[in-house]
Image: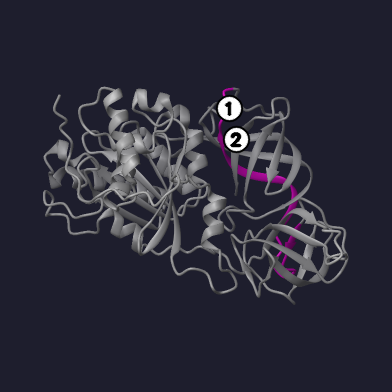
Amino acid sequence: MTQNYPPFRGMAAKRPGGPFVNYTFSKIENKTRMKLNGKSQNKSLLRFTTAGSVDDGKSTLIGRLLYDSKSIFEDQMEHIVQSGKRLGRDELDLSLLTDGLRAEREQGITIDVAYRYFATPARKFIIADTPGHIQYTRNMVTGASTADLAVILIDARKGVLEQTIRHSYIASLLDIRHIVFCINKMDMVNWTESTFTKIKEELGSLVDKLKIPDVYYIPISAKYGDNVVERSEKMTWYEGQTFLNLIETVEIKKNKNPDFKRFPIQTVIRPHSKEFHDYRGYAGRVAGGVFRPGEEVTVLPSKIKSKIKSIDVLGKVLSESIEGDSVTISLEDQIDIGRGDMLVAGDNMPVISQDINLMICWFNECPLKVGGKYIIRLNSNEAGCIVRSVNYRMNINTLEDDIKNISINMNDIANITIKTSKPVFYDSYKRNNNTGSLIFIDEGTNETVAAGMIV
């Protein structure tokens, strides 16, 4: 049987030895911060997520991007070819690169979030390929929760669908300020500019409703690579950037609020060794702002003040640490501090309260119960809570608040009010994504049932 493969613009890279590592976020970010204290590598890191309705070509876009940017090794390429043959597919299917589960390959859909890492001379990237099925909306929320940029695909034949609106709204809700709409499968509508223009206008009204600050529109064919890495010869009417050029050059503001110093404590480090007999350090990840030795900080919830003695990581002493850095901070005074506490700037305190109003994405098959008891986890802090009220449910089709139908089921988005068992400290999600987000855990099953963004 003759294999009718689409053309490729590039060559698969040869494996330099050893397996290709599917890095997690923590491993990637540790590598990007190998030389801290002002000596980090020049390449910036961009995290982006893909979303869209079923079969809009999300996995194919990523496969094409990795191939044409020479980020696929030869044996990976051979594995994709052989997998396609076993599945009886006549054409080479680049979506198999990210669809790793057997069920995904058999059905041709994405079920779980697939993370991929690649780099170009301009930038490093972490990609979260998220599923399009409505039943896996919770997976899309998970993949988008740490993204700097969202890529939402639209099938040029179908236009804007409910999932397009849902994913755009979730991206906006998660404070993703850069969204790229890729109108895919332009080859199936004869590369016509009028089709692209019509979909772009429809998306424009959606963008206006959601007040998304930075939006891009690109007509592509993920299958054949048009406007993915190289410009399309079939769509000469499009004068904008290719997809790769855009993600390489888009400016991302990493530290959104550098004045809001936030350092949640994850654990206390006491070596009890001869060399560090009296050392007491507080380990965690900087959730906001910049911390420097000698600066005064306030410990929450006790509100005791002290000064930073040192900032340490892997045997090195740092002159400063910024948002995203995993470090150990020691203080000049001996204070009772434990997991769940937080170091902040005394002149810029978070809210301390037991009453929280927030937006939630409900993940569980069992509906939300008003009066129900759950555990919330806010950074490293845990508390019990009771749901006091459901204020409204978001109507995805109209983007209006529904105050009548307030039964919250799986994949619903709603505004609720809760009361916690103890005072907790937090910011609004728009002010600080790290200290303004939380998850709900079912007390009986220990399942994560919802994600919340504090308003």
Which region of the structure is painted magenta?
A: 342-365
> Who is closer to the viewer here, 40 or 198?
40
Residue 24 locus on image (x, y percent): 53, 47
Say which quarter of the image contains residue 375: top right
Residue located beneath label 2 in the image: 450
Q: Secondary structure at mark 2?
A: strand
Residue 364 - label: 1
Residue 401 locus on image (x, y percent): 49, 38
Say which quarter of the image contains residue 296: bottom right
Q: Which quarter shows the N terminus?
A: top left
Kind of residue at disc 1: Asn
> Who is closer to the viewer here, 45 or 437?
45
Q: CA distance from mark 1 to mark 2?
A: 7 Å
Please tell me which of labels 1 and 2 falls first in the chain: 1
Q: Main secondary structure of the magenta part?
A: strand
Kind of residue at disc 2: Ala
Residue 55 locus on image (x, y percent): 31, 31
Callout 1: 10 Å neighbours few (<14), some, many (20+)?
Answer: some
